[in-house]
Amino acid sequence: VSRIGVLTSGGDSPGMNAAIRAVVRTGLYYGLEVYGIMRGYQGLMENDIKKMESRSVANIIQRGGTILKTARCKAFHTEEGRKQAYDVLKSHGIDGLVIIGGDGSFQGAVKFSREFDIPCIGLAGTIDKDIYGTDFTIGFDTAVNTAVEAIDKIRDTADAHDRLFIVEVMGRDAGYIALHSGIATGAENILVPEQKTNIQDVIASLQEKERRKKLVNIIVVAEGDEFGGANKVAEAIKQHVPGVEARVCILGHIQRGGAPSCLDRLIASRMGYHAVESLIEGRHNVFVGIQNNRMNYVPLENVGKRKGTISSEWMKIVKILAS
Ligand code: ATP
């Protein structure tokens, strides 16, 4: 490779800027030309591309969001769209692509790399941590810490009024943000999509604690929980535990923003560096993950295949510690 492009795609996550910086600076270090592609696949198709220098990524490691902006792009689902993207890359002489995004973005890259001779390397940039083959995704740690900070604050007011708060966190069909933030804030219960929600159990546990006069403040619900999210859970609780004053708080997009945590900056820097090394070494069409503190190169096509699971050990710990 001699000219590489880098883009961010799908939902943004804190630490994407640190990853862009690592890709640009590593590429330049190895004598490559690096091009920043704006707004993901959309900007690629529209030829919204600029050459990056070392200074283009100065003073961004600490910033949330993405300087390259991100987008969801319908046209990239079509063959014509991807052909257009390929023609743009060729017109710049770009012969390698780094895609920072979630599994949707990787699925796009799989199709693209099958159809055209552009090696693609993925970097897992998503707060959801829903990508198989890596212990970390860029943005997860920051999002979880934001959730923890918010839930701690909610707990103060919950405690003052003896109220129960049902807090909904992000994560789509993955429950990691809920699990981690719930454990870290001492939640009474954590409802995640990976486990069947038995609302009767939740209610029974509240009733039992009410009898013991134990005050319960927080239940954390993942947005993709099969029972239908925090509002539904609150309704069911109000119906069956009349004495409980239940309130709902949906944390929403604050979880995506803010300065990336130290951990997210570190893994973004490490993954970005290895993405460029992979392109140079000819390791193509993989995403760069970290497992057991070693780099793990997973073929992009395997990404969507297996989702992580949440161990029953964790769920047991939640139950015991909340008793
Ligand atoms: P996040 O997990 O943070 O939401 P994501 O990368 O999964 O990020 P998506 O919206 O699923 O976000 O995907 C981003 C873009 O990737 C889409 O808008 C589309 O352009 C492209 N893409 C996704 N899936 C496919 C697919 N199956 N084929 C072609 N392109 C796709």
Image (cartoon, helix red, strand yellow):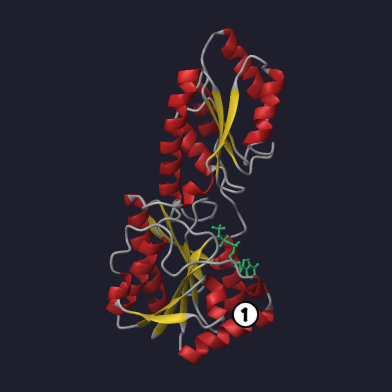
Give the SS element for disc 1. helix
- Residue 15, relative to residue 204: is it above or below? below
Quarter in which the N terminus is drawn: bottom left
In this image, 323 relative to 79: left or right?
left
Q: Quadrant of residue 202?
A: top right
Residue at coordinates 46% horizontally, 27% vertically from top-left?
155
Residue at coordinates 34% horizontally, 51% vertically from top-left?
263
- Residue 97, relative to residue 165: is it above or below? below
Amino acid of disc 1: Arg
Q: How many numbered discs sit on the rendered protein?
A: 1
Whether residue 1 can be seen here: no
| Residue 57 at x, y percent in the picture | 32, 70
Q: Nearer the viewer, residue 292 or 317?
A: 317
In this image, 77 relative to 284: left or right?
right
Judge: label 1 CB < 8 Å from ligand 1: yes
In this image, 232 relative to 175: left or right?
right
Residue at coordinates 52% horizontally, 43% vertically from top-left?
176
| Residue 31 at x, y percent in the picture | 30, 83
Q: Residues within 10 Å of mark 1 (few under 14, many from 20)?
A: many
Q: Nearer the viewer, residue 218 or 99?
A: 218
| Residue 224 at x, y percent in the picture | 63, 44
- Residue 152, relative to residue 305: is it above or below? above
Q: Quadrant of residue 85?
A: bottom right
Mark 1 = which residue? 82
Q: Quadrant of residue 15?
A: bottom left
| Residue 292 at x, y percent in the picture | 40, 51
